[in-house]
Amino acid sequence: MPVSTIAMQAEKKAVALNSVWAAVGITSLKIVVGVTTGSLGILSEAAHSALDLIAAAITFFSVRVSDKPADAIHQYGHGKVENFSAFIETGLLLLTCLWIVYEAIKRLFFRETHIQPSVWAFVVMGISILVDAWRSRRLKRIALKYDSQALLADALHFSTDIWSSSVVILGLALVMAGEAWSVPWLAKADPLAALIVAGIVVYVSWRLARQTVDALLDAAPKGIRSRIIAELRRIDGVLDVDRVRIRRGGSRYFVDVSVAMSRTVTFQKSEQVANEVAQRIRALLPGADVMVNAVARADRQESLFDRVRAVATRHNLNVHDISVQDLDGRLHVEQHVELEETLSLKDAHDRVTQLEAEMKADMPEISTILTHIESEPATIETGDATVPVPTFERQLQAVTQSFPEVVDMHDLVFKRVRGRLYLSLHCTMKDDLPLSRVHDIQTAMEGRLRQAVPELFRVLIHPEPHTDNRR
């Protein structure tokens, strides 16, 4: 496990455990002072703190479990435990609200309770405010550092405790003022303070509930889907974005995208585009687990040659030397197809016939297709590379000089493979020749060289620009 992951888990556990111990101390103090003074405001705060203790314990448990790696059963990891703990915390907060509201209404309208505020009540509530401020700041810092929803929920919870405790202090102060100044109606300030505490708790619960339900229902962050689509459409090689699905588990996002690419791109190119897609998404959602599905699609800018190759690629066949002629408004296609040399002529012809039929179905504008079947070597041939240079170099030079575009011929290599003579050579040509003309010259030279030297079985010419050979 990486050191950074270990450090993250240690920090999250430490801050969650500190929150548990702080909740134990504060809850105990509030219960003691609330019972001795009879203050509903303090008792409501004690009940609130007791639920804080339960929530803190649940948070501690959740951060211990949520960072466990994925396994065969939990294939997306255990991050949802954090979201589930926040859901439980929300339910506990709402239960607290019901009890506080019930007691406050009863004291306001049906039962009169005498409250005896003391210095200890103010001391305990002051300590509570200081502790809540300390732990909410620590929780929020670690929560933002590691994007932990459970810790952030606790930090939000405890930050609102500061305000609710302040309201209770105000209620107790008004009760004391009522006794000192003989203002009886100020005795109602305590249950009123309790209702205000309940209102604060409801507000916190509502915010937590929305975040929790969104996470449990796999709601995507607002606006992120449209931002991802806009970013991916700017990638060279992506024709369109068909699907974007986002879900969150704990602090990690899982993104499933389907992008359309040209059906003529190679497997290596599609992998490069997919990697770029994943990088762009992680720039928007750091650390996201991204799954990219590439969908082959016809590009609107495809030429007829691209469409012919696309159909061949669908059959895992390699076509080359494609030639298309427009004869009296009718298109005729000629092509070379490589097939395994171990195939029989019947099997090879059947495969080519099927290929031609699909090409005509995809491209009705094609009138006829003629396919030259070539054998694709499947074995490595052994030969002799120590063949002495034959004595017909004069004939070879004469052929070269008959092409004005050719500057020179060099690096001639002769080989014998299965008793046949092979020749490979480098040929320097003018820099500005178009590639189509270079190919025509190569083809013509190969034919003339074999005519001049009938012993040659195969000739391979490697063209080079004149600039490179002048360095």
Image (cartoon, rainbow, N blue to C red):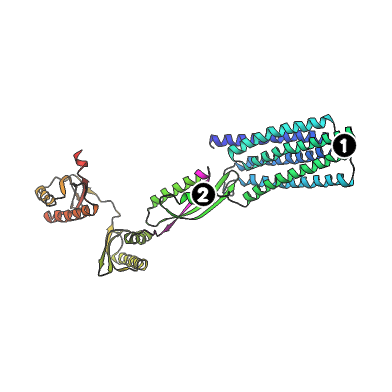
| 16 with respect to 181 (left or right) | left
Where does label 2 land, which residue? 227
Q: Is residue 431 above or below residue 335?
A: above
Which secondary structure, mark 1? loop
Q: CA distance from mark 2 to mark 1?
A: 58 Å
Indicate the quadrant where residue 163 lies.
top right
- Quadrant where the N terminus lies? top right
Q: Position of residue 38 (x, y in %)?
A: 86, 37
**Res. 115 mark:** 1
Classed neighbour count for the residue bearing mark 1: other residues with Cα under 10 Å, few (<14), some (14–19), many (≥20): some
Q: Can residue 36 be seen from the camera position used here?
A: no
Observer-nearest residue: 434 or 249? 434
**Residue 360, which numbered label?**
none
Q: Nearer the viewer, residue 36 or 177?
A: 177
Q: Residues within 10 Å of mark 2 (few under 14, many from 20)?
A: few
Kindly identify the amino acid type of the residue bearing the numbered disc 1. Ile
Q: Position of residue 132 (x, y in %)?
A: 71, 34
| Magenta-span inclusion, residue 279 | no
Q: Is residue 174 left or right of residue 315?
A: right
For this view, does 450 lie left or right of residue 74? left
Residue 285 in the magenta stretch? The answer is yes
Q: Position of residue 311 (x, y in %)?
A: 36, 62
- Whether the residues at callouts 2 and 1 have beta carbons within 8 Å, the answer is no
Name the element at disc 2. Answer: helix
Q: Quadrant of residue 68?
A: top right
From where the camera sits, is residue 276 visible? yes
Residue span colored magenta: 283-301
